[in-house]
Structures are given as structure tokens and as C-alpha cells.
Image (spheres, rainbow, N blue to C red):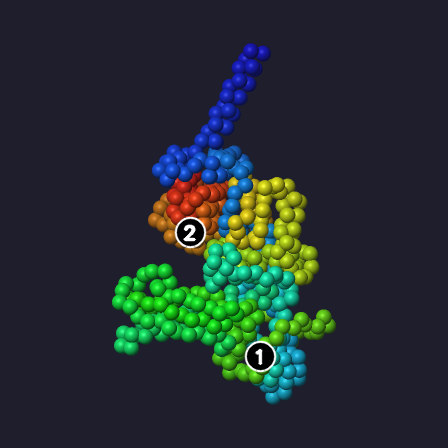
Amino acid sequence: MRLASLVLLVVGLLFQDLSIASSELPAAVRSVLNVRKLPDDSLSIYVESLETGESPLSWHDEQPRNPASVAKLLTTLVALDTLGPAYRWRTEVYAQGEVTNDKLQGDLLLKGYGDPFLVTERMWQMLRRIRQSGIRDIEGDLLLDDSYFSVPETDPAAFDREPLRAYNVAPNALLTNFKVVRYHFEPDPLTKAVSIRLDPQLENLQVINRLSQVNGRCYGYQRGITITPNEKFDRFVLSGEFPNGCRSYAMDRTVLEHNAYTYGLFKAIWQETGGNISGSWKNQVVAEDAEPMLSFESEPLADVITMVNKHSNNVMARQLLYTLSAEKLGAPGTEEGGREVIRKWLDERDLASAGLMLDNGAGLSREARISARQMAAILKYAYASPYMPEYLSSLSLSGLDGTLSRRFRNSPLTGKAHVKTGSLDHVSAIAGYVQGSSGERFVVVALQNHTDIHRGPGEEVQEALLEWLYEQ
């Protein structure tokens, strides 16, 4: 009995030591916190071996925190698990009139089902198929049906007073090219003027050039360019002093309202391919018994989540949330419906947490919350999923691509981590998988919320953590 008691005591002390060890920060992480004067309770970490199930490190791991774009890991996983990697969105085309001698004597209608990646090149492919069906001239209007989603009116400046940034674009069932144009600026050394080219060139968009040149190096916020829109975002004045040290400069910004943009893009490409449309555009819901002349399919979901996660595309992630709602609960898709689908998915897999707040599914939120432990549990579920290869390949590879392309370059960690990053004002986060130098693979989550943590200190903490983990 004495020997048995002694064994139990030793085992108990070992487990106590492991518990203490798991709650102590690695020296390199502790050093960053001390040097940057970051409070201990600003940081949550959870690490677990995917081979043994043991956790070598946990730190405030059950504290819900803002995850920023790390929230996309949950949205994309539920979409992949629910809809499947081969799921495709469709955009339907209806000819409302007779076609005679390559002329449609009536209107052309487009109905969107939420394709997140109907960009200029894909739009050109769809319009090419319409041309191949025998239509060159459209003698009516372009009718647009975006009723598959129900999106409330939102102020694009509400989040951070940057209404022209692509990450603030609201979802839409007929989203095209993310509602973005690229401005190309080039100074003319002879005339001292600054030329502006737009891609795509939209006929229903007016840009007034009031830029002037100034001697100087090519630097500064927007290179000194001020963009002033009107209320409809269809007229922009570009003013300011552009440094002649810039041989060229490009800037992406949003314009127009959703359907006005789709019409402008449609008309520009249609005319480029030799077609003509005589009318304007209108909103119209397609009749229930109507048959489309063609259905244009999107890229598969597996490719879409790669674009979402590697490049942290907010509006594409939000499109996924609305799609989940429409597909599982019925059209029209809503943000709340998408959250309901995800909550049910978590409950059915015993992954739910009282502290979870998903908000818009993209992480572009001040209210979103999740704990490091719950995010790790979600990542563990994904690793055991039949779609694990598609999910892992959607994450950024350390030092190689996506949001990690410039981090961990030329280091032992290059290519050893599949990770999603997240950053907002006062938020810095990272979550994913790391393969240690021994070959053992770990799930790792680090969430940090603190004043100005996004300005560099957060990345220092993450790098110290991942370098420590790699050596395990």
C-alpha cells in the first residue's frame, strides 16, 4: 500500500508539473511581452499535438477575444463541410424577347446566386457564351435580379470611415468584380499633368482629374491623392499633388452601387466583344416559371475558400455566410441565417461555446469573439475531416504565399506552417497548423487584443511562438 501511494504521489506531481509547464509562456514570448510592455492577460494561446493530443502550452485559452480575420477559418470550414468542395454557384441568363438576325428584341436578364468571384475575366467568359448563343445586339434593357440575398442598407464608412476600400464592400447576390476599379496614375514630364486610366472603364462612372504634379519622391498616403465621391458614388473628383518621383502608381477603390456597377461592367465588356445594348438597367425579379437560356457556373468552392483564406477576402467570406443561409434555410439568404447555420453545425459536433460571437463571418468586426481553445477544437475537427487536404491548402504557407508571403522567409519555418492571420486596429491573431522540426504536427492559436497590438508587437509575439513551437 505504501508503494502504491508513493507511485500515485509521483504521478500526481508529474501531472502537476505538466500543468504548470503548460501554463508558462516560452521565454521568447515572455521577452516580447516584457520589452513591448504588453500585459499578460492581453494574450490567449492554445497549442495541441495532433499526434498525441497533449497540450504543451495553454494561456488564457478559454477567454473569448476578437479574432479578426481568423474568424474566416470557421466560415470556410462550415461551407466546405456543408456544401462540399465541388459546390459551384451559378449566374443565370434569360432572354426576354425574340432573337432575330443576332438581335434580341427585348431585355436581357441576369439572376445571381451569390458567386463570390464573378470578376472581370469570369464576366467576359459568361458574356462570350451569350454571344455564342447568337445574340449581338440587345434592343432593350439589362435587367438585374439580386433577390437571392436579402442585404440591409449599410453605410460603407461605418466600420472605419473608409467607404471606398474593397474590404468594406457589402455582399450581393449579383456581386461583380468586388465593385472595384483600378486607377492607374502616370505623370507626364512634359505637360506636368497626371494621366488617369481606369480598369475596367465604366461608361456610367465619371472621374474628374484635378491632380497636379509636385517634385518629390514616390511615397505618402495614396501618393497625395484625395478622392471625393458624390452621394451615389458615380462621380469622383481626384485632386491633390502627385509626386513626379512615381513613374506609375495603381490604386484599387470601390465605385457605384452594386447593380449600377454590374451594368457598367456588362456594357463595357459587351461592347469590347462587338456587341451593343441600347437600353439602361433595371431591377427585376425573374418569373418563377422562366427558363434560363444559359447557366454560368462559378469556380468550385475549394478554389474559392483558398482565395478567402490565403488573401483574407472579406466580401467573399460574407458571400459564403449568405450562401449557407440560402442553401440550408431557403432564399433569400441573410446574415443572421448564416450565423444560425453555423451555430447548428457547431452544436451538432459539440464544438459550441457560450462566448462565441461570429458577427459577419469575415472577422471585419468589433464584436466578433472566440476563445483560443474553441478555435483549436475547430481546427482539430478540420484536420480529421475528409476534406482536410482542401482545407489545409486554403491556408497561407509560411514564407511562401498569401498573407504570410513576407513572413518567415529564408528561415527554418519556411513552408512549415499552414496558417490564417488576422489583424484589425488593436487586434492581432494567428491560427493554423505547424509542423515541428521533429515532424510532429501541432494546432496553434494565438489571439491578442490590446492597444496598438496590430502595429507590429502582435506579429513579434506570433513569430516567437511559432519559432518556439517549431523546435518542439
Q: Position of residue 90 (x, y in %)?
A: 61, 66
Residue corresponding to mark 2: 404
Q: Going 52% across and 61% down the picture, which residue do you hit?
A: 156
Pointers 1 and 2 in contact (C-beta within 8 Å): no
Q: Going 58% across and 51% down the picture, which residue do you hit?
A: 359
Q: Nearer the viewer, mark 1 or mark 2?
A: 1
**Tally of numbered discs:** 2
Considering only order in the chain, which callout, 2 or 1, is on the residue closer to the N terminus? 1
249 or 446, which lies in front? 249
93 or 218, which lies in front? 218
Side of 24 where 101 appears, left or right: right
SS at circle 1:
loop
Q: Position of residue 19 (x, y in %)?
A: 50, 28
Vertical order, 74 against 164 (above or below): above
Q: Position of residue 193 (x, y in %)?
A: 32, 75
48 or 108, which lies in front? 108
Residue corresponding to mark 1: 280
Residue 166 appears in view: no
